[in-house]
Image (cartoon, rainbow, N blue to C red):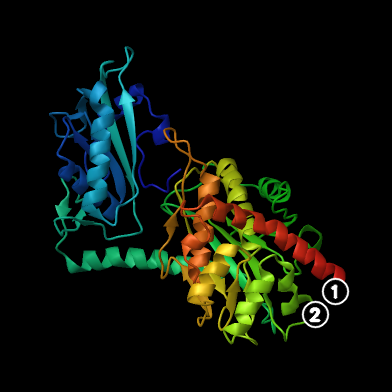
Amino acid sequence: MFNAEYNPFGKRLAELEATDLEKLRQVSEGWYIEYKSALPTPNKVAKAVAAFANTYGGWLFIGIEEAQNRQRTAGGFPGLDATKIAGEDERLRNSIAANIFPTPYFETKHIYGSTDATLPPSRAVIVIFVPRSSETPHIHSDGRIYRRVGDQSDPKHEVDPYQVQKLSARKADLESKVEERLALAPPLPQGERGLSLVDVIIRPRPWGERLPDHELTYEDFYDVMANDSVMPISNCFTSPYGFIGRQSAGEVQLEYNAVWQYHHDGLSLVTMPLLHFSENSPPDKHLQYLQYYSQGPAYLSEYEKRGLKGYPVIDLNWLLAFLTGVIKKHAVIENKSKLPPPYEAKLRIRNTSRVVPFLGVKSYLDFIGKSGIPFITTADLQFPPGRGFSQLAAASDTEAIDPVGINVGVLFALALNCVGIPIHVSGIDGGDGAKLNEVVNITAEAKNVQNIINGQTG
């Protein structure tokens, strides 16, 4: 569902049928509607899409002619050749992506004719829906900013500096809302310096304009959180934005627990701890426990050789299991909320100043043997940097892909980038299956090490 100002059909784009087009005989061109009887040049379509995104959003119908009356409603449905519609749609999509910066979100639908509809069976209409964008201004490749103006059918380039400023302010407002949500992440426990906190924020794209068709109830949220063997979370309660789930002591082997915040606009903010180990830490976080990893002794030797004794070591070996739990849970939330992809994500790691990372795989030991151990000097890290997000993969009707596996890999790569570890070290870039298997298996080692810690200090 879109937070759209106008929908002439009262139903979702995906649900439209040929008989629905009859409603357009009562709908005039203007702010939200544009009719094209024949296929325009891809460049003109890009201008129309940019203008809708920069204004209030709207609908572009290709294959519908304007009535010859003062109302400028839909007058006829000549359609396009149905056998060529897929190729034309791809050409338009490529043009939109190539000619608008940044590319706005849009959806297309092919409506094929039928014997019981005005549109003949051999013809089809392309519908392009563009929601109002918060990532404005969207600039055309000709260097101009286009907007819809009143009841004019063609977009006009904006020359008023005030209107351009308003478009920039719309984007700034979105970015400030992201900062507000990130500020809701649980703070570091007072006086606690022996851990870092990882925040993963996942939101629908476009955020704020595309909303769930089903607003999750408390029971829905609890069911998603609790019924999961990978990342069980049973301590659930409400919040002003939606719901919060917190792992209880019996559900996790670590003393600090993951927190999942779900907001009714489809955004999730998930936080988990990564422990620091050092010689000056309490017994349960003493550096000696890293020796129980298969690559631990070699790492500790390199750690001493590089003159890093005294600096805390951030243990990354729980991270892959955490990210796997996040992506799997989020896939269930997508289904229950009826808010399908696309989604985008950002990862942040807090309290990282003057720490060094440890990943218990041989490829990392090979890397630090050549390049040294990364030394983090920044208190808070995030990737993508600034206010950017990375788009997550979605299941495809044409490609056999595993979106869960791909997205876990994307988030893990973001985390490694944050702490100075190149992606090729993990094998996630597809270059080395053996490396990837070693990373996947590190979770079992992390559990064994934690069991040793619990047994000796519990």
- The residue lying toward the viewer, choosing from 156 and 360, is 360
Disc 1 versus disc 2: distance between alpha carbons? 7 Å
Task: Tell me: 166 left or right of 151.
Answer: right
Task: Tell me: 441 left or right of 167.
Answer: right
Tag shown at residue 457: 1
- Tell me the quarter of the picture where residue 233 sits: bottom right
Tag shown at residue 359: none
- Tell me the quarter of the picture where residue 166 sits: bottom left
Q: Give the quadrant of the C terminus.
A: bottom right
Q: Are marks 1 and 2 in contact (CB under 8 Å)?
A: yes
Q: Give the answer, above or below, for where 154 lies relative to 288.
A: above
Q: Residue at x 23, y 50 (%)?
A: 98
Is residue 55 among what the camera can see?
no
Q: Give the answer, above or below, for where 93 lies relative to 417.
A: above
What is the x, y in percent for residue 296? Answer: 68, 70
Q: Which residue was labeled with disc 2?
A: 283
Q: Which amino acid lies under the numbered mark 2 shown in the image of this protein?
A: Pro
Q: Secondary structure at mark 1?
A: helix
What is the x, y in percent for residue 259? Answer: 66, 63
What is the x, y in percent for residue 448? Answer: 77, 61
Q: Residue at x 61, y 63 (%)?
A: 361
Q: Give the answer, above or below, for where 259 lies relative to 187.
A: above
